[in-house]
Amino acid sequence: MEYTVIIPALNPDERLRDIIDQNWEMKNQIILVNDGSDIEYMPLFAELGEKCIVLHHRENRGKGEAIKTALRYIKSELWECSVIGIMDADGQHLPEDMERLLTEAALHPGTLILGCRSMNGEIPWRSRVGNQVTKMVFRMAAGTEISDTQTGLRAFSSELANFMLEIPGERYEYEMNVLLACAKKSIPILEVPIQTIYHDRKNRCSHFKKVRDSVRIYRQFFKFSSASISSFLVDYVLFVLFTVLFPEGAGFIAAANIMARILSAAYNYMVNCRLVFHEKPSVKTAADYAALAVCILTLNSILLQIFSGALQFSVYPAKILTECILFAASWLIQKQIIFKTGRNIFHASERGEKI
């Protein structure tokens, strides 16, 4: 059984030599991807080429593209490769931890293995806060939780290579997209605890750009949120329009609300199918969504009447308050039931195995 370790590298330091040496001693095949490093690093890559396969990008294309370049090489040249690992070049991952993940991947074909760090102890505050934020965003976007969404130490059997190549993303957002895609496709995710290593309090060795790469990572969640917000705006504009067009009388607010809700629900369903959850419209999801829409509409109308009638709120602020109350419930039901994502995320310790 042949293990292959992918190491993307951009302007690496001397720690990379130790990483290559240790993986080589473990008899792992190594693919080192030079992702557009400066010219002065070429002698180091040439030296390391004696113990590993070195692939070059003429310019920096991003970590996601570096990983995909190595995966394409494995598919075309390394036919006997059965397990693939990915680790960083900055020394934040130990080769012995990589070896443990490779072993777990061999034991669990079709499963994504994550090396998850403990967020306790001497962790740079930026990394600690960043991981907590991405955990929250991932939980909201995927409907499930991973303890370390930012880990770059990963492994999987080669049967997942084509799937990994299909996932969009060029830079650091690729790693988050992998987690989202696995959750969506119900691909099991196994979390294995690893040692936590930071070389200084500010984690200067990382090439992660706080603003640019964070926007890339959270883009998927922004897309989810924008669909719901746009649906609310459609609903609200139609509600205002119908209250102007309908003659005032008994039930005119309820009638305007129902009409706006029906049309905005149809819009929201199509947006969620096509752009958010990437599902083709189907009878089942449409029926489930219609049932949810009826329930939400009923509650929407009841709350709107309570706020605008019994509590004497102005009708338009009452509409906004009603939508805010029901937003969370609608979102959770869509994520957990209608467009359900997989929950196959577990820890190695949960199987009673020694790690």
Image: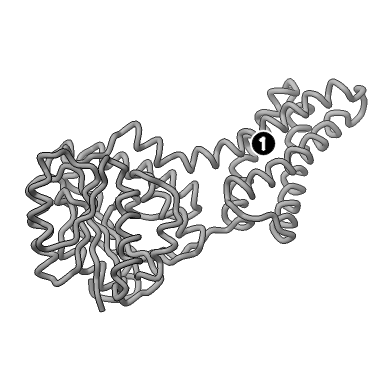
Asked whether 273 or 318 is in front, the reply is 273
Circle 1: residue type: Ser
Residue for badge 1: 231
Quarter location, residue 319? top right
Asked whether 236 or 52 is in front, the reply is 52
Residue 68, x across and y down, in percent:
35, 55
Residue 171, x across and y down, in percent:
34, 43
Quarter location, residue 204? top left
Residue 79 located left or right of residue 285: left
What quarter of the picture does the C terminus occupy? bottom left
Residue 133 located left or right of residue 316: left
Residue 8 located left or right of residue 308: left
What quarter of the picture does the N terminus occupy? bottom left
Q: Determine crowd level at label 1: few under 14, some 14-19, many 20+ residues with C-alpha closer than 10 A.
A: many
- Secondary structure beneath dot 1 equals helix
Residue shown at 42% from the left, 45% from the top:
136
Residue shown at 38% from the left, 74% from the top:
109
With respect to residue 226, does 295 lie above or below? below
With respect to residue 313, does 278 lie above or below? below
Asked whether 217 or 258 is in front, the reply is 217
Residue 29, x across and y down, in percent:
20, 68
Residue 289, x across and y down, in percent:
71, 52
Residue shown at 31% from the left, 43% from the top:
62
Residue 286 located left or right of residue 10: right
Q: How is the image coloured?
A: one colour
Quarter location, residue 232? top right
Q: How many marks?
A: 1
